[in-house]
Amino acid sequence: MPTSPPAAANSADFQPQKLLFICSQNRWRSLTAERLFDQHPHYEARSAGTEPGARVRVTAGHLSWADVVLVMERKHADILRQKFAEALTGKRIVTLRIPDKFQFMDHILQDLLRERLREHLGEEVP
């Protein structure tokens, strides 16, 4: 179900929703998703990977920071649940179903991310 930013988005109390994007290596998919939200007024985004050689490897701290965890494939959610069950308590996990076949900032990847993210975040997707 899409979520909307609070009506008081301009108030001093407004806090952007924190999105954590996860893929395997944090080089192409999740990093591209993070970049889509650079300078977005309603969201703050970070990204990480599940594999040992990831550019940034996901930690319990990343998961604790996030309001919503968005994984590219079901296997990423499974890994997170196995390794970080406690840090995921009460967290919303969304599987975007985006295969590992795109390069960083690929235009098709960006379009696919926007399409899948609108299903979960609404029209505020850049």
Image: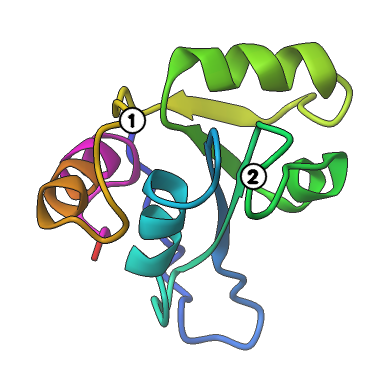
Q: Is residue 52 left or right of residue 61?
A: left
User: Looking at the picture, does residue 4 appear above or below residue 14?
Assistant: above
Nearer to the camera, 68 or 105: 105
Residue found at x 55% / y 59%: 17
**Residue 7 x %, y %:** 41, 69
Q: Indicate yes or no whether the magenta region holds residue 119.
A: yes
Q: Which residue is mark 1?
A: 100
Residue found at x 74% / y 27%: 90
**Residue 20 x %, y %:** 58, 48
Residue bounds of the magenta highlight = 115-125
**Residue 16 x %, y %:** 55, 68
Query: Label 2: few (<14), some or many (≥20) within 10 Å?
Result: some
Q: Which mark is residue 54?
A: 2
User: Looking at the picture, does residue 101 appear above or below residue 25?
Assistant: above
- For the stretch drawn in magenta, what is the main secondary structure? helix
User: Looking at the picture, does residue 28 appear above or below residue 14?
Assistant: above
Q: Quadrant of residue 36?
A: bottom left
Q: Secondary structure at mark 2?
A: loop
Residue found at x 26% / y 58%: 125
- Residue type pointed to by label 2: Ala
Q: Quadrant of the N terminus?
A: top left
